[in-house]
Structure formats: structure tokens, C-alpha cells
Image (cartoon, helix red, strand yellow):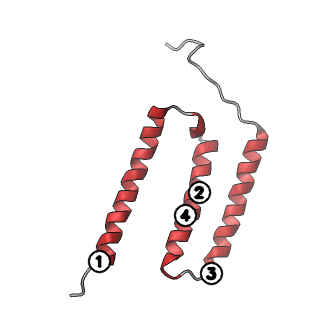
């Protein structure tokens, strides 16, 4: 059972939530604007970068991960590292294939 000394409450004001929401709206607008630009092979990279920033904002503020302990961060970052490894190894396989 936890005592009062171990319970930490983090209150985030409405201003922070409104600023994060506005940032998400702006990033959505940037996503739409960037979709009309041509970056060649980097179109997907730019789209995923913007989506990653938006997902990070949601996870940090709306899911309150900003205030979690290190153990929780391990469980959050482990699947992200595995996903990056999977995407990286797939990219290596696709980009370095030889023609039949």
C-alpha cells in the first residue's frame, strides 16, 4: 500500500492543454501543406517525422507520460526501439536488393 509520501500528483493547467492542442492543429496543417510538396523519396520520411512529433505530444501531455518514472519509460521506449529496428532492417533489405 502506498503512503502519502509516495504519491506525487502533477497538475497541468488548462493553458498547457490548450497550447498542446494548438500545436497539434498547426502540425496537422503542416502535414496537409507538406503533402502538396514533392520531396522525392523523402515524402514518407517527412510525413512520419511530423506524425512522430504529434504522437509524442499526445503521449507526453494527454497520456501524462511526462510525469512517469523510469520504469514506465522503459516499457514505452522498448516497443519504439523494436519498431525502429524493424523499419530499419526492412529498409536495408528493400534498398540493397539486387535485380533478378
Q: Which residue is mark 1?
A: 96
Q: Secondary structure at mark 2?
A: helix
Q: Residue at x 49, y 13 (%)?
A: 1
What separation in Å lies between label 3 and label 4 (alpha carbons)? 15 Å
Residue found 50% across the figure and 70% down from its top: 45
Quadrant in the rendering for residue 46: bottom right
How far apart are labels 4 and 2 at the CA level?
6 Å
Determine crowd level at label 4: few under 14, some 14-19, many 20+ residues with C-alpha closer than 10 A: few
Label whose residue precedes the other's in the sequence (3 or 4): 3
CA–CA distance between discs 2 and 3?
19 Å
Q: Earlier in the sequence, mark 1 or mark 2?
A: 2
Q: Locate residue 36, reporting x and y percent.
A: 64, 80
Q: How many marks?
A: 4
Q: Nearer the viewer, mark 1 or mark 2?
A: 1
Q: Is residue 4 above or below residue 26?
A: above
Disc nearer the start of the sequence (4/1)? 4
Residue depicted at 40% across the width and 51% down the height: 81
Residue 12 occupies quadrant: top right
Expressed as whole percent of the image width and height from the top left, the position of residue 4 reads 60, 13
Q: Label 1, label 2: how many angstroms apart (C-alpha)?
A: 29 Å
Give the residue number, with chain letter if any, for mark 3.
37
Q: Are marks 4 and 2 in contact (CB under 8 Å)?
A: yes
Mark drawn on residue 49: 4
Q: Which mark is residue 53?
A: 2
Amino acid at each position: 500500500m502506498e503512503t502519502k509520501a509516495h504519491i506525487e500528483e502533477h497538475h497541468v493547467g488548462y493553458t498547457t492543454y490548450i497550447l498542446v492542442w494548438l500545436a497539434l492543429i498547426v502540425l496537422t496543417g503542416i502535414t496537409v501543406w507538406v503533402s502538396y510538396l514533392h520531396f522525392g523519396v523523402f515524402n514518407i520520411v517527412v510525413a512520419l517525422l511530423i506524425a512522430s512529433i504529434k504522437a509524442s505530444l499526445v503521449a507526453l501531455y494527454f497520456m501524462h507520460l511526462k510525469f512517469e518514472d523510469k520504469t514506465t519509460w522503459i516499457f514505452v521506449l522498448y516497443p519504439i526501439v523494436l519498431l525502429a529496428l524493424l523499419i530499419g532492417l526492412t529498409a536495408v533489405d528493400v534498398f540493397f536488393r539486387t535485380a533478378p
